[in-house]
Image (cartoon, rainbow, N blue to C red):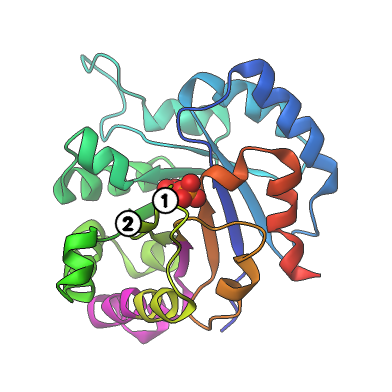
Amino acid sequence: MSRKPFIAGNWKMNKNPKEAKAFIEAVASKLPSSELVEAGIAAPALTLSTVLEAAKGSELKVAAQNSYFENEGAFTGENSPKVLAEMGTDYVVIGHSERRDYFHETDEDINKKAKAIFANGLTPIICCGESLETYEAGNAVEFVGAQVSAALAGLSEEQVSSLVIAYEPIWAIGTGKSATQDDAQNMCKAVRDVVAADFGQAVADKVRVQYGGSVKPENVAEYMACPDVDGALVGGASLEAESFLALLDFVK
Ligand code: 13P
C-alpha cells in the first residue's frame, strides 16, 4: 500500500496569463522527483492554456478548478470536461467549498461532474469539508462522510481507487487557523473509512486523501507525517513560486 504524496496548489481566482507563465517557468525545472511526490497547480480557466503550455515537458500536473457535467451544449459560461481533456489537463477540482457556498453546487452536481470527468479520461480531486458550526457541534465526521458517499455514488472501484479526495474544513480555509495534526489525521482517516464502507478496504487503501486549509511551508511536514494524509491542497501559500517549491521540501 503505497500512496504517492500529492501537493496541489489551488490558485483560485488569482493570476493573469503573464503571471501564471512566470510562475510555471520559475518552478518547472525545480520540482523534486515525481518518484517521490506529485506536484500540481489548479489554475483558473482563463490561464489554463498558458499554464499547460508552460508546464509542457515538466513533471508538473495541471488541474482545472471546476468543470460542468455535460461535454457541450447550451450552458453559457460553463467549462467542458471534454475540452479540458483535449487541452491536456490532468485533474479537475470539484466540490470546493467556495463552489458549494457561493455557486450553490450540490452533492448531486458533484457526483455528476465526477462521472463526466472520468468519462473524459480525467481524474477528479473531490473536495469536502465542514463549517465551523458543524465542527463545533461535533458533527464533522458524519457531515463529511455524507458528502464523500454522495460524491462517489455509482463510481467503479477502479475509478475511486484512482481519484483524490481533499478534506478541507471551511473554518481553516484562508483563515490562517489550520487544523491540528490530530484533526487532519482523524478526518482524513474518517474519509478513508467511508470509502472502505462503500467500496471495500482495498479501494480505501489506494485512494489519496489530501488535507487543505492554511497549509504552508512551515506546517506541511506535520500533516504529511500523518498516516492517512497523502497530500495537501494549498491556496494562499501556492501563489508564490518560492513558497510552492518550499511546500515540496518535506520529501527531502
Ligand atoms: P488556503 O490554503 O488559502 O487556506 O486555501 C485552502 C483551499 O481552499 C485550497 O483549495
User: What span is in magenta?
Assistant: 190-211
Residue neighbourhood size for the residue with mark 2, other residues' Cα within 10 Å, grouped as few (<14), some (14–19), many (≥20): many
Q: What amino acid is labelled 2 in the image?
A: Trp
Instruction: Return the mark for residue 175.
Output: 1
Question: Can you give x and y, in whole percent of width and height, for residue 217 in the image?
Answer: 67, 58
Question: Can you give x and y, in whole percent of width and height, for residue 66 in the image?
Answer: 37, 36
For the point 43% across and 73% down, the residue is: 184
Taking 16 as reference, is 248 left or right?
right
Label 1 to label 2: alpha-carbon separation: 7 Å
Question: Can you give x and y, in whole percent of width and height, for residue 20 in the image?
Answer: 65, 25
Which quadrant of the figure has residue 168?
A: bottom left
**Dot 1 beta carbon under 8 Å from ligand 1:** yes
Q: What amino acid is labelled 1 in the image?
A: Thr
Please indicate, yes or no, whether residue 216 appears anywhere in the rendered image.
yes
For the point 70% across and 47% down, the residue is: 243
Q: Main secondary structure of the magenta part?
A: helix
Label 2: state its secondary structure.
helix
Label 1: state its secondary structure.
loop
Taking 106 as reference, is 218 left or right?
right
Please indicate, yes or no, whether residue 59 appears anywhere in the rendered image.
no
For the residues bearing labels 1 and 2, Cβ distance under 8 angstroms = yes
Instruction: Return the mark for residue 171.
Output: 2
